[in-house]
């Protein structure tokens, strides 16, 4: 089934922005990759930033089916869902030989000062992502220390993921990613051990799989 | 005192890459900002990547006097030095109204796939930074749980900093930064409480200063 012209442009731009960044991606390259007539780009997206906004809307609209659902279907335990989601980024790094990381994080640093409309949409994506993590943490609230701010903890999880992906891509190695996640896991283990009802995570996979470097 | 032409080019490129990113910075803009003759750019730096490499070498050579020394002079306690360094990034965000973050982190995501020579130098900068953190952690080793991998923990600190700066710049708010650091502090407090000799951090500032949103 052939996608329509607008969708083809969004998908081509999405993939090129992810692989090369926004500024390094040329308009001609997007048109060529999408296999559409150059005039149609300007019809649907008068400016390059309009296309960027559409790409960020695409990510916003596909968070659940593209990212969360595959993990949620595989894992039931809410704490393990958090680490399962993080492991998904590790798999992306592995599959792409460190070429691709978090699409929003990539664009966030490149465009933080120059594209306010896009920046607001990146923020929406981050809020959605941490919202999904917070739901997991809320579902595990009886195992966490009483009164813990799950919204705040969800933001912490996002910062570790973004930093871990950045360092792994720079080093072209899983080492920094695995180290960061190992300490996040250690932090969670300590929170869970300090929890009100439970004293250990349920369904916790052995930590050794987080230590295996490429 | 007027810096020499090469230094002026490096400083101009450093500041422009930090504020706008690498790809969005034009060669003409660098020459204009440096106030040098256009020909001198190509004399010292035949390619834009050569200039990028010089900028990364500048950061490598100024880690101590530009970043660490001001914090080390102010704070003696090794654990508090770690959080003092993180607070320096918060100050940078504050002073620049979220326009400037970690210069290496910025470039790392933008250029991870395209500039291998620069990427290797970014990695050198990250290794230097985590090395300084590891020295702090080693100096506090008798307060941390026995056998903790301080090298690995230092990498974790870097991931939290990079993620926290990214989210703060995207949201134009200290909220995500402060949340991430608050949980890193909580993790450290739990490690220190579990330590072999000490049971609490020394010289710990009250956490409330980390919670004050802008």
Image: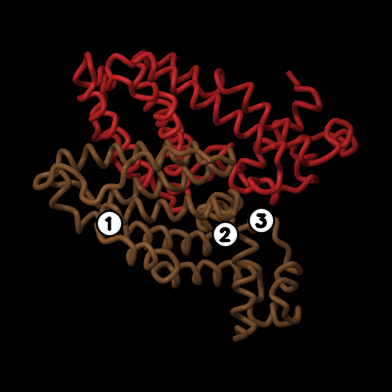
Chain colours: A red, B brown
- Residue beneath the point at 66% across and 48% down: A113
Label 3 secondary element? helix
Where is B100 relative to A67, above or below?
below
Residue A103 place in picture, x, y as percent: 58, 37
Residue B29 place in picture, x, y as percent: 74, 67
Q: Classify mark 3: residues with Cα within 10 Å, few (<14), some (14-19) or many (20+).
A: many
Q: Nearer the viewer, mark 2 or mark 3?
A: 3
Say if labels 2 and 1 share a chain: yes
Disc 2 target residue: B115
Point out which mark residue B134 bears.
1
The chain ID associated with circle 2 is B
- Residue beneath the point at 55% across and 19% down: A64
Residue A149 place in picture, x, y as percent: 38, 25
The alpha-carbon separation of the residues under discs 2 and 3 comes to 17 Å
The chain ID associated with circle 1 is B
Point out which mark residue B20 bears.
3
Where is A158 relative to B121, above or below?
above
* Image position of A61 (left or right of A150): right
Label 1 secondary element? helix
Which of the two discs, 3 and 1, labels the residue nearer the N terminus?
Answer: 3
- Residue beneath the point at 43% across and 47% down: B161
The image quarter containing residue A87 is top left
Judging depth in this view, the residue of A56 and A212 nearest the camera is A56
* Image position of A80 (left or right of A190): right
Which of the two discs, 2 and 1, labels the residue nearer the N terminus?
Answer: 2
Say if labels 3 and 1 share a chain: yes
Question: How many marks are shown on the rendered structure?
Answer: 3
- Residue beneath the point at 76% across and 21% down: A2
Judging depth in this view, the residue of B203 and A63 nearest the camera is B203
Whether tag 3 and tag 1 are in contact, CB under 8 A, the answer is no
* Image position of B135 (left or right of B178): left
């Amino acid at each position: 089934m052939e996608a329509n012209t607008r969708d083809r442009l969004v998908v081509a731009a999405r993939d090129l922005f992810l692989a090369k960044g926004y500024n390094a991606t040329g308009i001609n390259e997007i048109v060529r990759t999408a296999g559409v007539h150059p005039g149609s780009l300007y019809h649907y997206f008068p400016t390059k930033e309009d296309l960027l906004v559409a790409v960020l809307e695409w990510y916003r609209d596909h968070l659940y089916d593209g990212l969360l659902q595959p993990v949620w279907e595989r894992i039931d335990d809410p704490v393990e869902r958090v680490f399962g989601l993080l492991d998904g980024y590790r798999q992306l790094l592995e599959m792409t030989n460190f070429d691709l990381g978090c699409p929003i994080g990539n664009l966030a640093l490149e465009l933080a000062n120059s594209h306010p409309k896009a920046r607001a949409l990146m923020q929406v994506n981050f809020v959605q992502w941490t919202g999904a993590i917070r739901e997991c943490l809320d579902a595990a609230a009886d195992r966490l220390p009483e009164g813990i701010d799950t919204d705040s903890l969800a933001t912490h999880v996002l910062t570790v993921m973004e930093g871990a992906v950045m360092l792994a891509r720079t080093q072209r190695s899983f080492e920094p990613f695995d180290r960061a996640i190992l300490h996040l896991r250690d932090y969670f283990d300590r929170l869970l051990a300090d929890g009100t009802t439970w004293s250990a995570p349920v369904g916790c996979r052995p930590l050794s799989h987080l230590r295996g470097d490429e």
